[in-house]
Structures are given as structure tokens and as C-alpha cells.
């Protein structure tokens, strides 16, 4: 169903020849980030936890458009400012502020000689002002109070500060070792409580601090076993139809390990289950229930084949339901058409051309056409919406939002009728899908490549390069390990 295809707007974010940012993010958004970053830099707000510091804003602009040098140059200026702030803080004996500024400068890869010179001065001042013995006493007290990590005054950072000053300090080495063991013990307790996210965070902290810690392998094995148990529990919930619980389980694992393929596949399976329920409801013309299940599926995996099929079935069910109105008396049929056209006009005024599914201007008009295709007002509205459909397709194609472009094109074809312009647009969209699929295949994402192949073939079976791409997908499928 064309209207519902729009929900998958984010799956076509792969480009052909231009940087992604030029399609996805308007220049005004990038310029605003750089302007805000410059203002934060001028105000001395070099970094902020809420993401509104100069560093974070420049990094956001750089992520949106890595091909321009403005944001990169801005980060260099942030680094220079961090070094200046560190120098001033050292002169004023504000050692914590100096340490934070030097940490920022180091993360921004400022010249090592400048950073090291200031860092040496900082260590000298720390040695004089604080003293190693005082740091060790504070670290031991923090550990005894259970304040192991998470702040500058907690045990692990304090022991690490001593080791920066005196790398071979035995008391600090043993204290850090014991503190890391305490953290791993907390991780094991978190696993027992079912808090796998906290356990994973604690284990990762220990891995960063000391990858060779003697207790780490056992704790990692325990975490792996718990993750496996969570996946099996999610699988069982899915088999029993407890879809919300299953989704929570898969998402919990995915939140800990974003690259976990089993968790990703599980979420798609949950989406497929919602899609199957939607199709069954649609078959019985239970439109509201079918729509509810489809929305659940779309929120998880909008471009999964089963979800796309469920959209089509729901659209067909809506049309089947509306065709029943054709048997109504003429006066009631006309009244129904007037109501649909009024709803379409309201949706058009709101800018809801294709969304939300079932309540968009396009959907309302299509339903009215199913009841009274020759009604003059229906024909007039179709003519009025035709340019909007064409513009929707062109904008989505320029932005490389291919799923959205397909939905807009289907709407345009229904309003315009199949002609040479529509056929050319389908061919153009098919070529985009082939290019996207080729790139996904090169990245090893076979399922995405197959989806791109199926979509391109449905758009234009004779598109240039389609057969060659199909051969490459077939070859990759034969060599891929079985799921």
C-alpha cells in the first residue's frame, strides 16, 4: 500500500554520488549548529554534558557533513581554547579545572608537546598541593564507603591519579586492583538482579581500566551466559505470543550489544508477528485492530517484507470495506463521498498528504474514488492533489528517501494514470534501489540487498543493471552461511 510505505523513510539513507548530509540535512541545519557552536566557544562553554557545548555542537555539524572543513576547524579552535583555559587555571591553582581542560584538549588531539608541557606543570602542582599520601588516603576512604567509581572523588579515579604521578606505587596498584574486583562483584550482583545493562557497563569500565584483570574472564563468561539466557527468554515469549515482552528482551540485548545479530533478527521477528496479526484482522475487515497491529510492526521494522505486505493487505481491506458502501442508496452514497472529500480537504490543509495512514488526503480521496470514481468533485480533487504527489516524489528522490519516494510515486500514478512519465519515474527509482542494494551487498548486508533487489524488480523488471545485480545477490546468497 503506497500511503503506508512512507513510514519507512529512514531505511533509504544510502547515497550514490553526493554526501549523505546534502540529501538528509538542509544546509541551514548545519549552519545553525556551527553558529551555536561559535557562540558557545565565545562564551567559554567548550563542552557541556547536555550537548550544547562548542565541542558537541561542532561534532554534530561534522557528523552531518564530514566533507566540509568549517566544523573541523571549529574543533581545532575549541582545542586551542581548552589549552588557554588550562594555562589560566594552572596560574590560578585551580587544578580540577586545569585537569578537565587538558583532558578536553587531549581528546581533541591538540599538539602533544603543548599538552604534555601543561600536564607536567599540573602534576608538579598536584604533587605539591595534594600529595600522594593524601590522594591514597582519600581513595581508601572512598572505597571503604562504597564509592568505587563515577566521580573525581571516588576510589578508582583517585588511585589512577596516583598512578599517573607514580606509576609504580604499590599501594595504588593494589588499591586499583581491589577496586576493580569490587566493581566486578557489583556486576555479578547486577546480573543476579537481572540488570544486564548495568552489569555490562561495569564490566566495560573494568575492561578499559585493566583488560588483564584476573577476575574479568569469569565475569565476562557469566555476562555472556546471561545474555544468551535473555535471548532464549525472548524467543520463548515470542513463541507464546507475548510480543511486548519479547521485544523488550531483544531490545535489552541490542542496547548492550548494538551489533548483536540475533537481537536484531528477533526484533524483526516480533515485527513480523505483529504484521501477521494485522493481516488476520484485515482479512476479517477489523480495520481498527489491523491498523493498531500494523503501527506496532512499523515502529519496529518499517521495511520488513512482512510489514510491507501487511500495509498492502490493510489498504485492500479498507477498499473492500468502502466498496460495501456502493450498495447503499444513492443519497447515502453521495453523503459518504462528501464526508470523505471534506476529510481529504482538511488533511490537505494540514499538509497530511500521505500520512497518517488511513487519514491522509490521498487515502481519503482514494476511498472516495472506490465508491464514486466518476463523481465530478472526486475528479476535481484528484486533479488538485496531482501536483502535490509529483512534488512529493521529486523531493523524496532528491533526499534519497527511496521508500517515501515509492509511496509518493504510487499516489502520483493513481492520480495521473500510467503514462510515459510514470514509467520513467519508476525506472529512475529502480536504478536508485539497485545502487543502494549494491552498496549494501558490498557492506555484507545480504538481507538489505535482497530487499533492494525485490523492490527494484517490482518497479521496473527491465531496469539497466538489474540482472547483473541479481546475479551478484544470488552468488552472495550461495556463499553466505545459513541462518
Image: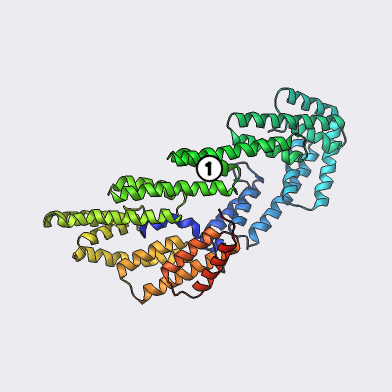
In the image, residue 141 sits, relative to residue 267, either above or below, namely: above
Q: Is residue 416 visible?
A: yes
**Towards the viewer: 10 or 291:** 291
Left or right of 429, for residue 373: left
Identify the residue at horizontal 64%, vertical 37% (top origin). Answer: 223
Q: Mark 1, residues whose alpha carbon is within 10 Å: few (<14), some, or many (≥20)?
A: some
- How does the figure colour the protein chain or chains? rainbow
In the image, residue 181 sits, relative to residue 71, either above or below, namely: above
Q: Which residue is mark 1?
A: 251
On the image, the x and y values in percent for residue 38 come to 62, 52
On the image, the x and y values in percent for residue 85 come to 74, 44
SS for callout 1: helix
Left or right of 422, for residue 141: right
Q: Quadrant of residue 480?
A: bottom right
**Towards the viewer: 422 or 217:** 217
**Which corner quadrant holds the N terminus?**
bottom left
Left or right of 347, for residue 109: right
On the image, the x and y values in percent for residue 212 come to 78, 39
**Towards the viewer: 184 or 345:** 184
On the image, the x and y values in percent for residue 380 come to 24, 66
Amino acid at each position: 500500500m503506497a500511503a503506508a510505505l512512507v513510514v519507512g523513510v529512514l531505511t533509504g539513507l544510502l547515497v550514490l554520488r553526493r554526501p549523505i548530509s546534502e540529501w538528509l540535512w538542509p544546509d541551514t541545519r548545519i549552519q545553525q549548529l556551527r553558529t551555536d557552536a561559535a557562540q558557545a566557544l565565545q562564551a567559554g562553554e567548550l563542552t557541556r554534558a547536555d550537548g550544547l557545548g562548542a565541542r558537541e555542537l561542532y561534532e554534530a555539524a561534522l557528523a552531518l557533513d564530514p566533507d566540509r572543513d568549517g566544523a573541523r576547524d571549529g574543533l581545532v579552535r575549541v582545542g586551542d581554547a581548552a589549552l588557554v583555559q588550562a594555562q589560566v587555571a594552572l596560574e590560578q591553582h585551580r587544578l580540577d579545572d586545569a585537569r578537565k581542560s587538558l583532558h578536553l584538549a587531549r581528546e581533541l588531539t591538540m599538539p602533544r608537546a603543548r599538552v604534555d608541557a601543561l600536564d607536567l606543570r599540573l602534576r608538579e602542582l598536584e604533587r605539591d598541593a595534594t600529595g600522594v599520601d593524601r590522594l591514597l588516603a582519600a581513595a581508601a576512604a572512598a572505597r571503604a564507603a562504597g564509592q568505587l567509581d563515577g566521580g573525581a572523588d571516588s576510589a578508582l579515579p583517585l588511585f589512577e591519579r596516583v598512578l599517573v604521578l607514580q606509576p609504580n606505587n604499590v599501594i595504588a596498584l593494589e588499591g586499583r586492583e581491589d577496586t576493580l574486583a569490587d566493581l566486578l562483584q557489583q556486576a555479578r550482583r547486577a546480573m543476579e538482579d537481572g540488570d544486564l545493562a548495568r552489569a555490562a557497563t561495569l564490566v566495560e569500565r573494568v575492561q578499559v581500566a585493566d583488560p588483564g584483570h584476573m577476575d574479568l574472564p569469569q565475569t565476562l563468561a557469566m555476562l555472556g551466559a546471561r545474555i544468551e539466557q535473555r535471548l532464549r527468554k525472548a524467543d520463548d515469549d515470542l513463541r507464546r505470543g507475548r510480543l511486548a515482552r519479547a521485544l523488550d528482551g531483544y531490545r535489552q540485548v541490542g542496547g548492550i550489544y548494538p551489533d548483536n545479530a540475533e537481537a536484531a533478527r528477533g526484533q524483526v521477528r516480533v515485527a513480523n508477528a505483529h504484521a501477521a496479526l494485522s493481516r488476520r484482522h484485515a482479512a476479517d475487515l477489523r480495520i481498527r485492530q489491523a491498523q493498531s497491529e500494523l503501527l506496532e510492526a512499523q515502529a519496529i521494522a518499517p521495511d520488513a517484507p512482512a510489514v510491507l505486505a501487511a500495509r498492502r493487505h490493510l489498504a485492500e481491506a479498507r477498499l473492500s470495506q468502502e466498496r460495501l458502501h456502493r450498495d447503499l442508496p444513492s443519497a447515502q452514497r453521495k453523503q459518504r463521498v462528501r464526508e470523505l472529500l471534506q476529510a481529504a480537504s482538511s488533511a490537505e490543509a494540514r499538509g497530511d498528504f500521505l500520512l497518517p495512514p488511513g487519514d491522509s488526503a490521498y487515502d481519503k480521496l482514494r476511498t472516495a474514488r472506490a465508491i464514486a470514481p466518476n463523481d465530478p468533485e472526486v475528479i476535481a480533487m484528484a486533479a488538485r492533489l496531482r501536483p502535490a504527489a509529483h512534488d512529493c516524489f521529486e523531493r523524496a528522490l532528491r533526499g534519497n528517501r527511496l521508500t517515501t519516494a515509492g509511496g509518493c510515486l504510487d499516489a502520483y500514478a493513481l492520480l495521473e494514470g500510467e503514462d510515459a512519465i510514470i514509467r520513467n519515474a519508476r525506472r529512475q527509482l529502480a536504478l536508485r534501489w539497485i545502487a543502494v542494494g549494491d552498496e549494501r551487498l558490498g557492506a555484507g548486508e545480504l538481507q538489505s540487498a535482497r530487499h533492494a533487489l525485490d523492490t527494484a524488480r517490482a518497479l521496473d523488471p527491465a531496469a539497466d543493471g538489474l540482472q547483473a545485480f541479481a546475479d551478484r545477490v544470488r552468488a552472495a546468497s550461495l556463499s553466505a552461511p545459513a541462518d
